[in-house]
């Protein structure tokens, strides 16, 4: 009984948007406590009736179990929604120029219309790619419709480090697992069931196998925005639309 309940809770919590009810947590604690007592007594399920005849500890434990069973029937949902962040506003410089504003409008329009699932923002160092991406991020956060994940990639990265950063934001537990494919499977399971997610990968220098990371980019669930100096990187990652950014403002992060 307890194992089934705990399994349901763990599956719900994997989404990062649910947490177990306090009453359920307390219920599980009591069940585990009773289970420990039963084991200590050496009492097996088939022996409880015999113990009841003696009015021993097993009878008391059995009574407690019955109460817990009745209590479990009133739980309803085992987990409740959490007020998880959809993204925090990033600090950035002010927008400069009509072209800058037009690029923001183009990206937001592509996301809203659902024409593409992956967008590249490409330009030389200092062109303002990171600044543009931050403004896009903040606009999406303001709309509250989107869950926006920001990850700075840079030159030195690994699949595991990207998984950790995305998982940390989504609330997916990966620290107990070292196998890269299993970690990717957990992320994939959450992202594929979550609508209106935008993952922004800033400062990408080389091709990334995003399936190995666990990111299922599609129009149905998860969208992708990357910034890169390389048009070839944007193409190899699979960006369906690439927006070229001309040098407009200085950006210390590039």
Image (cartoon, rainbow, N blue to C red):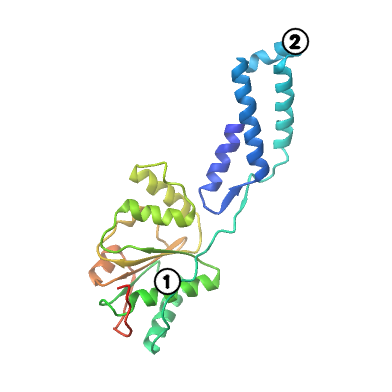
State the separation of the CA atoms marked 1 and 2.
Answer: 73 Å
Q: Residues within 10 Å of mark 1 (few under 14, many from 20)?
A: few
Q: Residues within 10 Å of mark 2 (few under 14, many from 20)?
A: few
**Residue at point 25% right, 67% down?**
233
With 217 as the anchor, is 43 left or right in this view? right
Disc with the residue nearer the chain's start (1 vs 2): 2
Q: Which residue is mark 2?
A: 54
Q: Quadrant of residue 176?
A: top left
> Looking at this view, is 102 or 51 the one in front?
51
Task: Name above or below for residue 240 compared with residue 73.
Answer: below
Which numbered disc, 1 or 2, marks the residue closer to the eye?
2
Question: Callout 2: helix, strand or loop?
Answer: helix
Q: Position of residue 106 (x, y in %)?
A: 41, 79
Q: Report the number of discs.
A: 2
Question: Callout 1: helix, strand or loop?
Answer: loop
With 218 as the anchor, is 231 left or right in this view? left
Quadrant of the frame with the N terminus: top right
Task: Name above or below for residue 38 compared with residue 110.
Answer: above
**Residue at point 31% right, 64% down?**
238
Q: Position of residue 222 (x, y in %)?
A: 44, 61
Quadrant of the frame with the C terminus: bottom left
Q: Could you tell me if residue 110 is visible in this image?
A: no
**Residue at point 58% right, 51% down?**
18
Q: Quadrant of residue 59?
A: top right
Which numbered disc covers residue 115? 1
> Looking at this view, is 223 or 14 the one in front?
14
Q: Position of residue 214 (x, y in %)?
A: 38, 52
Q: Position of residue 111 (x, y in %)?
A: 45, 72
Q: Are marks 1 and 2 in contact (CB under 8 Å)?
A: no
With 69 as the anchor, is 213 left or right in this view? left
Q: Could you tell me if residue 48 is visible in this image?
A: yes
**Residue at point 39% right, 87% down?**
96
């Amino acid at each position: 009984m307890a194992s089934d309940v705990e399994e349901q809770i763990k599956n719900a919590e994997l989404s990062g948007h649910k947490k177990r009810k306090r009453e359920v947590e307390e219920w599980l604690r009591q069940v585990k406590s009773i289970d420990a007592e039963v084991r200590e007594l050496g009492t097996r399920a088939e022996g409880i009736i015999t113990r009841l005849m003696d009015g021993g500890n097993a009878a008391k434990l059995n009574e407690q179990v019955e109460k817990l069973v009745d209590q479990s029937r009133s739980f309803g949902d085992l987990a409740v929604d959490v007020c998880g962040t959809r993204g925090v506003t990033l600090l950035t410089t002010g927008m400069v120029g009509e072209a800058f504003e037009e690029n923001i409008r183009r990206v937001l329009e592509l996301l809203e219309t659902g024409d593409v699932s992956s967008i590249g923002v490409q330009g030389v160092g200092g062109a303002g790619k990171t600044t543009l991406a931050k403004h896009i991020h903040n606009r999406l956060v303001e709309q509250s419709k989107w869950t926006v994940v920001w990850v700075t990639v840079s030159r030195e990265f690994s699949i595991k480090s990207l998984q950790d950063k995305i998982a940390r934001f989504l609330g997916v537990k990966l620290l107990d697992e070292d196998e890269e494919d299993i970690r990717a499977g957990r992320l994939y399971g959450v992202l594929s069931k979550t609508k209106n997610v935008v993952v922004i990968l800033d400062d990408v220098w080389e091709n990334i196998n995003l399936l190995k990371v666990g990111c299922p980019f599609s129009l149905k669930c998860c969208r992708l925005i990357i910034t890169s100096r390389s048009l070839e990187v944007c193409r190899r990652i699979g960006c369906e639309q690439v927006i070229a950014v001309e040098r407009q403002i200085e950006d210390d992060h590039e």
